[in-house]
Amino acid sequence: MTKVLVEQGWLEGEKKELATKDGHFYSFKGVPFAAPPIGKLRFKAPQPPIPWEGIRKATQHGPVCPQYDFFANKFVEGSEDCLYLNVYTPELEPANPLPVMVYIHGGAFKSGSGNDDFYGPDFLVKQGVILVTINYRLEVLGFLCLDTEDVPGNAGMKDQVAALRWVKSNINKFGGDPDNVTLFGQSAGGASTAFHVLSPMSKGLFQRAIAMSGVPNCDWCENFEPRERAFKLGKQLGSDTDDPEKLLEFFQSLPVEKLVDTGPCLLAFEEVLIMEAGKTNFFVPVAEKDFGQELFLNEDPFEALKAGRVNEVDLMIGYTSEEALFIAGLAQPDFLARFENWPEVLVPKKISYNVPQRKILELSKRIKERYFGKKAIDENTVKGFVRFFSETGFTYQIQRFAERIPDQGESRRYFYLFHMESERNLFARRAVTEFGLAGASHLDDCLYLFHANASFPLKVDTQSKTYSLIQKMCMLFTNFAKNGDPTPDTSLGEIWPEFDGDANYLCIADRLVVGGHLDSEMMAFWRSVYEEAGMEF
């Protein structure tokens, strides 16, 4: 056992063997980084962590946020007292402070945690970095917006900032360098990372960022009339009021299970969207109104990008080769019929909320033609279905975001396409075996960075080709974390050139391949869709 003194008191962690059986690391789990957001603190910005007396055991994860786990298809009770992080370090007293990587989990802002059942540190700490994983409040608990001083929105994002501040103040006690922090995340965690690149509240808390398969402008991250949606939820749950203070009191009085997986629709077409993977999120980050509070973000992300209001950090960003393979299991007749019957749901949410219905119908015909030709959307066109969700849920939006990151000082940008394939591509498996599709799915890349201890306890054979892929992936990410350059030399086979707006990316596969103008035809199509809608692409 081993002890560390942080600002709030003593922690007792443990020394653990790597999954590869060729080394050890130090583990500190369930470390509180903010006060429990319970009672009258429900929905509000996080408060500073509470000190403790004596020695606090740090060998078990803290509770997860209450949530509906859509992979397990069940409600997970967890606890509202969920603001905990985990620290894993290869050394407590290194000769020189170690680079730090802080990971934000995905889950559509609705589910997940930083626990090692999926995000085990073994592969990354072996590369000489400290890994920190965090929890944050999810769905309504983290993203209710009443447009008031108490509940302006973004509580979940402010949880993440609180975790970063804790790291800044305490990571040196674990052998880490507080001035060399890389923030990274996947899916909603990738979008969160990109939000932090824009947020004035996050400035100075990290030096590098890796946004994996998610950005603020993805369809599933778009908000619409968040205050009105909050009142609609109140009515749905039994409070018909137009007073935000009364609504807040009502929400704070409810048992937490009433607030999970609610889906309050404001418009008729959302009743269709709520069953549509990739467009179901109603409680997400927002542009806050200024009531004198500390603002996470008070403008549309694209407006911040256009104005150059971006934190000066190095950025790595990208997506997998076929993001939506993981939803192939949804391709059942009843589900696919929704798209055939109401093709207007093929149109991006941002457009749907802002242009006339006649134009939406015109655009839906163009989109359906691109992905399905003259065929019906049914079990015979699953390949087009997956391609549609890959491109509209992730890829073109990620490129849109990356293209707008301004050149700033010495900061660097890198773009990637992840295309590794092995038995670790578990999320693509059903699509590959049942539908004959191929590629790397959303989430598959995580299994080359993390050892999933419980969720997917895959054997780690250090002599296998798969393990060489794991090492390659981890080296790219940790090289970037160490000095801002993922390929400082040719030891991985290629030098990864910086992204220059529309060219220069790295395909991360069995071997690294440099390319240019990734998915340019797709980008041209979606640019024309936005232009026809009269909206900026």
Image (cartoon, helix red, strand yellow):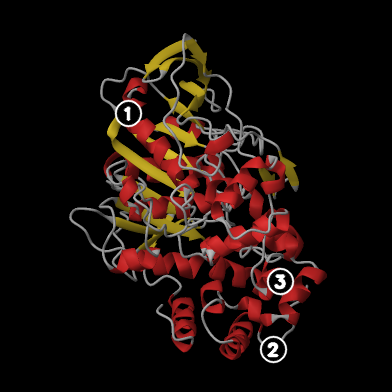
- Residue occupying image coordinates x 57% and y 33%: 82
| Residue under the point 52% across and 19% down | 58
Q: Amino acid at mark 3?
A: Val
Of callouts 3 and 2, which one flags the residue occurring earlier in the amino acid sequence? 3
Residue farthest to the left, as pictured: 409
Q: Which is more foreground, mark 3 or mark 2? A: 3
Foreground disc of the pair 1, 2? 1
Q: How many marks?
A: 3
Residue 63 location (% of width, % of height): 61, 30
Crowding at mark 3 (Cα within 10 Å: few <14, some 14-19, many 20+): some
- Residue to which mark 3 is pinned: 272
Say which residue label 1 marks: 169
Asked if one can make out residue 245 in the rendered structure from this viewpoint, the answer is yes
- Helix, strand or loop at mark 2: loop
Q: Position of residue 12 (x, y in %)?
A: 48, 13
Whether residue 260 is situated above or below residue 431 in the rendered picture = above
| Disc 1 residue type (three-letter) | Ser
> Residue beneath label 2, please?
374
With respect to residue 202, does 277 lie above or below? below
Residue drawn at x 29%, y 59% is 497
